[in-house]
Image (tube, helix red, strand yellow):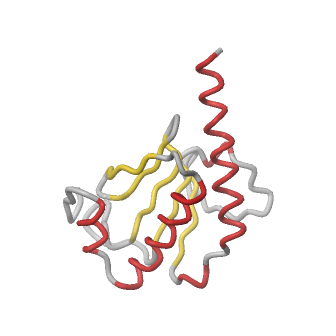
Amino acid sequence: MQNVQFRNVNEFLDFLQDDELEITEFLRELVLSSIPNITEKLSYNVPFYKMNKGMFFIWPASVLWGKKRTRDGVRFGFQQGYLLADEIGYLERGTRQQIFWKTFTKLKDIDTEILKSYIFDAAFVDEQFASSKRK
C-alpha cells in the first residue's frame, strides 16, 4: 500500500526531500511548541499527534498512499476537522466528512498565526473529549 516503511521519526525525516523537510520540520515544531503535552507517533509512515483523541498529522506527498504520487507539498491534517470553526474556509476537505487539511508547497505559504489559531481550536476540541470522559 505504501512506498516506504520507517521505524522512527528520524528515518522519516531523513527520507524527505529538502523542500518537504523544511515544511515538515516547521510544522512539527509549531505543533510541539503550541501543545507541549502532545504525543507524536508514526502511523501510516507519517507523524500523527494525539492527546485525548487523534488531533493532527503531517503527510508529505513523497510518502505515498497507494502506488502513485497524487499531489505536491506537505499536508497538515486535522483529524477532528469537522468540529473546528472554519468561517474563512481555510481548510480543505475534499469529499471527507471528518478529516480536514491544509496543503503547503512552500514554507512562505504558511501563515503561522492563522494555523496556530486552528491548532489551538483543535486543542480546545480535544479537551472536550477529556471532559466528557470525566463525567
Q: What's the residue at 25%, 74% (across, down)?
A: 15
> Quarter of the image containing the C terminus?
top right
Give the quadrant of residue 5. Answer: bottom left
**Residue that sits furthest to the top in the current view:** 135
x and y percentages locating residue 123 in the rendered image: 63, 45
The correct choice, above or below, for 109 with respect to 75 in the image is below
The furthest residue to the right: 87
Q: Is residue 38 left or right of residue 126?
A: left
Q: Which one is nearer the viewer's eye here, 90 or 68?
A: 90
Residue displayed at 33% across by 50% down: 43
Q: Position of residue 113 (x, y in %)?
A: 71, 69
Q: In the rendered view, tell whether residue 52 sits above or below residue 56.
A: above
Does residue 15 appear to the left or right of 107 in the view shown?
left
Q: Answer with left or right where residue 59 lies relative to residue 6.
A: right
| Viewer-side residue, 5 vs 8 | 8
Q: Residue at x 20, y 56 (%)?
A: 7
Query: Disc count in the image?
Result: 0
Locate the N terminus and report the quarter of the image it occupies. bottom left
Residue at x 47%, y 64% (from the top left corner): 28
> Where residue 119 appears, x then y in whole percent?
63, 55
